[in-house]
Image (tube, rainbow, N blue to C red):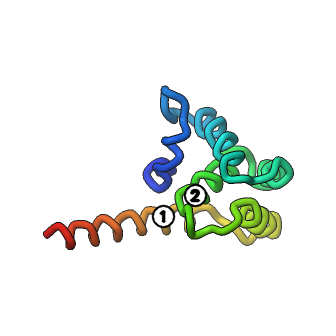
Amino acid sequence: MVLQACPDILDYAAKGGIDNWRDLSTTAALVRSALGVSPDAWAQALEVLGEHDASIVIAAILQRGEEIKSAGGYLRVLTAKARAGEFSLGPVLMALLRGKVAKGARERQRAG
């Protein structure tokens, strides 16, 4: 589901792709740096969200691309929300998946 919602992270993966959580975590650490997220913001996200969820958040930030002006600032906001018990990854992934479906429908309309 993560790779369906956030396929752009595959562009940063090692040659073997992303086949497990370790691959995703390793790739997210690389993407974190490419997005300009500070080591401190990443460390806080890892502490609060855990390695899997923090990696998914990085994939989602990458997928949203130009919509997010400051990846590090956005990650800090989401980390603070998670610390307060006000953040869940489910809605983030579902919104990305819905966006892909809507984009596909628009492209089919233009082609048809």
Would you place residue 100 above or below residue 7 in this image?
below
For this orientation, the residue located farthest to the top is 16
Gap between marks 2 and 1, in whole Å?
A: 8 Å
As drawn, 21 above or below 90: above
The residue lying toward the viewer, choosing from 99 and 20, is 99
Can you say which quadrant of the picture contains the C terminus? bottom left
**Crowd class of label 1 (few under 14; some 14 to 19; many from 20; radius 10 Å):** some
Q: Residue at x 69, y 41 (%)?
A: 29
Q: Residue at x 49, y 27 (%)?
A: 15
Q: Residues within 10 Å of mark 2 (few under 14, many from 20)?
A: many
Left/right of residue 26 with respect to residue 105 in the rendered view: right
* Residue 43 numbered tag: none
Instruction: Return the x and y of residue 74 as percentages of the image width and height.
Output: 71, 66
Please give left or right for residue 73 compared with residue 102 in the image: right
Q: Amino acid at mark 2?
A: Ala
> Which label number is shown at residue 60?
2
Residue 84 visible, this angle: yes
**Which residue does the image show at 21% across and 67% down from the upper left?**
108
Across and down, in percent, residue 45 comes to: 78, 54
The percent position of residue 90, horizontal first and vertical second, equals 56, 63
Q: In the depicted view, which residue is nearer to us: 1 or 31? A: 31
Query: Circle 2 sits in a helix, a strand or a loop, which is it?
Result: helix
Do labels 2 and 1 touch, CB within 8 Å? yes
Q: Amino acid at mark 1?
A: Leu
Horizontally, residue 77 falls left or right of residue 14, namely right
Q: Circle 1 is placed at which residue position?
A: 96
Q: Residue at x 58, y 55 (%)?
A: 62
